[in-house]
Image (spheres, grey):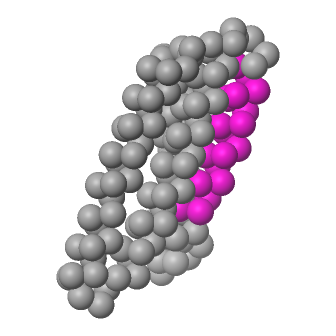
Amino acid sequence: MDRTSLTRIERMNYILGGAFIALVAAVGTGEQLLGAVVGTALSALNFTLLRALVERLAGAASGANNRRLAGLALIPKMLGLMAAVAAAVVFLPLSVPMVAAGFSVFLVSITVETVRYVLRTPAANGNQ
């Protein structure tokens, strides 16, 4: 996979997240909708930050120290994500299973792009 795959996954994450929220809005309760929105939003933000960090890591080929510093940026991102999830669960009246389901939307996005990548021809993937 390449950088365009990461962008496609990010875009698919937003599209599938919006569809998931719309579905929950149509058939779920208010707590379920809030859980889906929070989970999907945190998932989308997490993947956007992760994509930026991965691109920085890929571009930091000029020295192990630069890669180490870029890799260390993953720690505050993860701590912030855990704090946001914990705060949402404690302070908001939401459905925790729907937070988990909303957060899992990115797994579907990754699966969709992986299948697209595998089904393309080697030349389309940049492999000859």
Viewer-proximal residue, 35 or 11? 35
Relative to residue 96, is residue 30 drawn left or right? right
Q: Position of residue 17 (x, y in %)?
A: 65, 37
Q: Residue at x 73, y 33 (%)?
A: 19
Number of marks present in the image shown: 0
Q: Residue at x 52, y 41 (%)?
A: 43
Classify 127 as above or below 88: below
Q: Residue at x 24, y 88 (%)?
A: 63
Relative to residue 110, is residue 79 drawn left or right? left
**In the image, is residue 12 part of the stretch drawn in magenta?**
yes
Check the image and name the residue furthest to the front: 91
Which region of the structure is painted magenta? Answer: 6-24
Viewer-proximal residue, 7 or 95? 95
Evaluate whether residue 88 shows in this view: yes
Evaluate whether residue 120 shows in this view: no
Viewer-proximal residue, 20 or 2? 20
**In the image, is residue 55 part of the stretch drawn in magenta?**
no
Classify 53 as above or below 11: below
Relative to residue 25, is residue 17 drawn left or right? left
Q: Position of residue 125 (x, y in %)?
A: 53, 71
Q: Main structural element of the magenta stretch: helix, strand or loop?
A: helix
Relative to residue 65, is residue 51 drawn left or right? right
Q: Position of residue 33 (x, y in %)?
A: 67, 19
